[in-house]
Amino acid sequence: MAVSHKYRTFDQLINDVSVDFRTYALEGMIEPQQLIKVATRVNYDLGLRIHKTKQDLIEVEHGKGQLPSDFNYLNYAFVCGDYKVVNTPPSGTHIDTTHPKYVPSPDGGDIGPCDDPTCKDVCVVQTDCNKKDDGYMVVQYVGAEQYRTYSTFFPLKIKESASVLCECPNVGSTAVNIAEIKDNFILTNFDVGKIYISYQGAMEDTEGNLLVLDHPYCNEYYEYALKQRILENMLFAGENVSQQLGLIEQKLRAARNNALGFVNTADFAELRKIWEVNRRAQYNNYYNMFKSRPTFY
């Protein structure tokens, strides 16, 4: 029978490490912001690719646009045309990003695009939510009471890469607009423009806290990885911790082997299946948005 996997936040992981490194913690030698990337790297090493689906509008200048700092995988993307500036939030219904359907506002009031209080930056909404037609628009908030709407879109071909899998609808596109994702930038064959992206961000909870797997076979891998980085930082700062670092590195290798042995079991395959299902759902969203425009691809 499959095991139900649990998670803990990065802060909880830091607390457990600080208990073992109590003296270093009291002396201020543990800096959490320097350790987030270490925990994220362990997530990747374990194959944890269950991320939060996010949306953003990328500004392209001189053929280059900066991707979000938490960008991991692209679901789909397209080029946005001219926009209109609106000073009153539009009303409508919410389109769930995973299961396209209409969810009325709980109180019947107008609270902004999609009637979704979580939509504060960029989101895709239907152009006529009451009639539920096939048209869509991208809404971008630019201020407390102002937003932009984009309703003209152009297809975008994106080269396959580690963050753009072959199943991504942009890979097979025959569009004249071409892009490539490299070093957390999107490089384009056009000089200036805006690109809407649906992507998988960091694995985090509803409050934006990084999550790590909480399992006896994996906990030590996370903890020793963080301890190694803490001791490395201290060593670079001139502290005499070479002996402790050597011991931690030995334990880290053993802990990693145990964790990787666990993730290759049938129990862990459940997590990968969830990620695959979500990824296919995002690809379907792209085709559903433009099913009335077969030439878009």
Image (cartoon, rainbow, N blue to C red):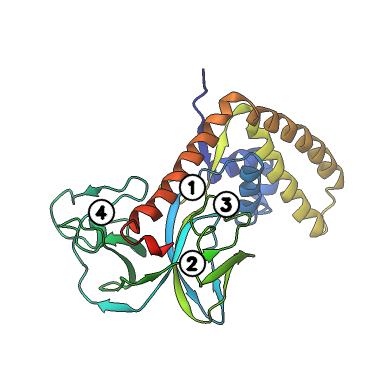
Type of residue at label 3?
Leu
Mark positioned earlier in the residue sequence (1 or 4): 4
Q: Are marks 1 and 4 in contact (CB under 8 Å)?
A: no
Please state the horizontal and vertical placement of residue 53, each as a whole percent of the image: 44, 51
Q: Are marks 1 and 3 in contact (CB under 8 Å)?
A: no
Mark positioned earlier in the residue sequence (1 or 2): 2
Q: Label 1, label 2: how many angstroms apart (C-alpha)?
A: 29 Å
Q: Which residue is mark 3?
A: 165
Q: Label 4, label 2: how many angstroms apart (C-alpha)?
A: 26 Å
* Dot in front, 3 or 4: 3
Type of residue at label 2?
Leu
Residue 204 image label: 1
Mark positioned earlier in the residue sequence (1 or 3): 3
Type of residue at label 4?
His
- What crowding class fits label 2: few (fewer than 14 Cα within 10 Å), some (14-19), or many (20 or more)? many
Q: Which residue is mark 2?
A: 156
